[in-house]
Each structure stands twice: as C-alpha cells, then as structure tokens.
Amino acid sequence: MRAVGTMSLRAFSSLALCLTASMLFVLLLSSGVEAKNCGGPVECTCGDRVVEDAKLFKDIGVCKGDGLRLQGGDLDCQGFRIIGFDNRKDYDGIRVDSPLGSRISNCIVTGFYDGVYFDRYSGSSVERSQMVGNFIGVRTGDGVAGRPPAKDCCIGTPKASNAGT
C-alpha cells in the first residue's frame, strides 16, 4: 500500500514530460523569428530587410520591433498596413538604410515611434502613404559621415495624426 502524498514513478514521469513540453512551448513563443532578406519573390514580414523591389499582399504586424528595414529597392504596400505594437518605444515602421534612392509608396504605417525613419539615404521618397497613430510620422536622421542629412522627401503624404508631430 502506498502512503498518501507519494507519487508513483509513472505519474512523476508524466508530470516531468508535461513540464518539459510546457517549457519548450514558452521558449518557442519567446524566441523571435530571425529577420530575413525579402523582396522580389520573397514575402516580407515584421523585422525583415527589404533588399530588392517588394510589394505587400497583406497587412504586416503586429510588429513588436521595427516593421521593415528598406536597404535596397522600392516598397509598394499597395494600400496594406504595417502595424506596430507600441508607439512609445523607439521602433520604426519603415527604416530606410539604403544609400541609394528608394521609393516607399501606398503604405499605411501605424503604431510605431517613427512611421518612416530616414537614416542614410540619397534621393529616397515617400509617396501616397499615410502615417497614422505613430509618435512621429516621418523623421530624418543626421546622415552618415560623407553623406548629407536626409531631406524632407514626402509627396502626398501628410504628417498629421501622429502624437508627436
């Protein structure tokens, strides 16, 4: 006869297996998906680096970090949204790192600190896009050594409806 409060080996093994499976599930949820290069035939998702011309075919988000990093090519959102998680954190909906001219068009960017942040670039533009519910709609950086600072580059893109602008 077994004493009350003791556990059989079988019950203990089942409990250990359940705990191990639970811990693996939590680790999978907490580990972020690695950013990948996207554009061309590769669909973009939160945090990805756009390295060639890209079109969105659905909303992206809710992103818990940067939306997309534009490092080459043009981005046409085709009216789809890039959605952020918290506009008080220093995350960008679209961060333009491209040293070459890139065009962002037809995007709705919401829920980020910066809707679009231009860092180092030359001749890039935002066209027919909406920055809504971000802290700053479109922000330009100070450039990089040897390159001029970013200039206001927005065509048909109002900067209104953002908390800090």
Image: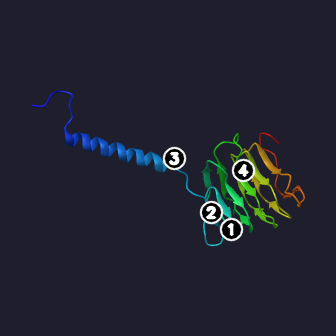
Tag 2 secondary structure: loop
What residue is shown at x 36% (from left), y 47% (from top)? 21
For marks 4 and 1, the one nearer the N-term is 1
Q: Which residue is mark 2?
A: 44
In terms of image quadrants, where is residue 41?
Answer: bottom right
The relative height of residue 33 versus residue 89 in the rendered view (above or below) is below
Residue 63: % across, % down = 62, 50
Q: Which residue is mark 3?
A: 30
Q: Which residue is mark 1?
A: 54
Type of the residue with mark 4? Asp
Query: Which residue is situated farthest in the bottom direction here?
Result: 41
- Viewer-side residue, 54 vs 34: 34
Frontmost of labels 2 and 3 is: 3
Circles 4 and 1: CB atoms closer than 8 Å: no
Circles 2 and 1: CB atoms closer than 8 Å: yes
The relative height of residue 67 versus residue 134 in the rendered view (above or below) is below
